Image (tube, rainbow, N blue to C red):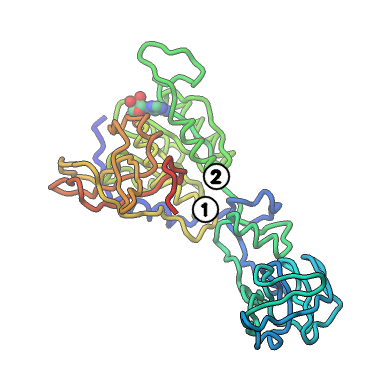
Amino acid sequence: MPVEKRTPIPVREAVNRVIKQDILLGTTEVDLDQSTGYILAEDIVATYEIPRFDKSPYDGYALRSKDTLEASGERRIEFKVIDHIGAGSVSSKVVGEFEAVRIMTGAQIPEGADAVVMLEQTVEDQDTFTIRKPFKPGDNIAKKGEETQTGDVVLEKGQVVNPGAIAVLATYGYTKVPVYIKPSIGIIATGSELLEVGDDLEEGKIRNSNGPMLASLCQKMGIEVESYHIQQDDLESSIEAVNKALETHHIVITTGGVSVGDYDYLPEIYKAINATILFNKIAMRPGSVTTVAVANGQYLFGLSGNPSACFTGFELYVKPAVYKMMGAKKYYPQIVQATLMEDFMKPNPFTRFIRGIATFDGQQMTVSPAGFNKSGAVVSIAHSNAMIILPKGTRGYKKGYQVNVILTESQAFEEEFNI
Ligand code: AMP
Ligand code: MG
């Protein structure tokens, strides 16, 4: 068979072809404690104000500010304590002239009072205390509705349920959360050279590392995955395997077999299942042969078998597609600028993605390659937290250049922070 000629498209075009499929799976409700990582399917509207009542942000005394006006270091003013209330309690007393209610953080301001004096600002005696400075109406009071008014959209449809959103949902009494259904993903590693993780090594064979890596990438996104057995480079059984995975999962990711080699069957598999190919050549390295197709509203991601290319393909194409499919309003990767710490002088005919380590050195964001960086590299992926983007060009990149970087991992740092 003659080698098929493929026309490379820019990365941006490829990502957008994937995104534009607009595949959504409908909505459902999940328990609040299971909802982290889902995307909200409805706006969440405040049914009451936050705070719900004027309350004290401190432990102290609630009093009338007008009684404090004459207070000074020379002329301390004395107040009589008429009640004690903790958080959750409401005083039945009305605060009168030179009276105060001892109040704890979170407690409702009693009637009559319009300011709170912090305990540290008082000198206490038995049933009285004195202060040495005047207060204004509203001092040290968290006002009813100062954060949120009734009717405010506090969370938007399309936003991810993160721990802060959980707190908001809890505040408004959501035991069930309206979310979009998440896609489930089937993963098939293809290649007759592959062994399962638990297999003993054999001559000419390698263990399947892409499959577990992809499963882990999906799990990190909170996506359910099924990892199928290794698929030999055999057309008939490969078609069967992909069809089977499509029956049970919304998305099928394969690795390997996307090139134009004698045993690269992915193009034929797509043909056999009548999939529409969105692209099969991207102007990027590694992973230029990454292929994405759709069949009956289902995505098929054909990632390269080269581990680094496989990882890059997931970050660039699978992740945005999955977020979009989960109903997310934001689905593109976060890009930051960093100072390149090493030369890359070879000209690039295609945009290059290099696994990197991005760090803030106290002054600026810097990025260095994460180690051995050929497309077949495995170990460097583990040490990277970023992908350096070097756009195609004829001149290469020198240490000190500003480059764009995709952050792929948020992590803790070794250095003690200096705050
Ligand atoms: P392919 O995309 O099938 O041409 O494979 C490209 C390279 O990646 C070859 O060196 C393969 O042996 C290697 N490879 C393919 N699949 C995997 C896998 N699942 N895990 C690790 N390496 C792989
Ligand atoms: Mg192969």
Instruction: State the image quarter where residue 116 is shown.
Output: bottom right
Instruction: State the image quarter where residue 135 is shown.
Output: bottom right
Place of residue 32 in the rendered image (x, y in percent of width and height, measured from the top left): 69, 54
Q: Earlier in the sequence, mark 1 or mark 2?
A: 2
In-front residue for pair 391/239 = 391
Instruction: State the image quarter where residue 178 is shown.
Output: bottom right
Place of residue 366 in the rendered image (x, y in percent of width and height, measured from the top left): 30, 48
Asked if residue 153 can be seen in this view, the reply is yes
Q: Residue furthest front?
A: 74
Give the residue number, with chain letter if any, for mark 2.
250
Q: Residue furthest left?
A: 395
Kindly indicate whether the residue at mark 2 contacts the one at mark 1 (C-beta within 8 angstroms).
yes
Horizontal arrangement in the rendering, residue 42 relative to residue 87 (left or right): left
Q: On residue 368, which mark appears?
A: none
Circle 1 packing at 10 Å, graded few (<14), some (14-19), many (20+), is many
Q: On residue 325, which mark appears?
A: 1
As helix, strand or loop, the secondary structure at mark 1 comes to: helix
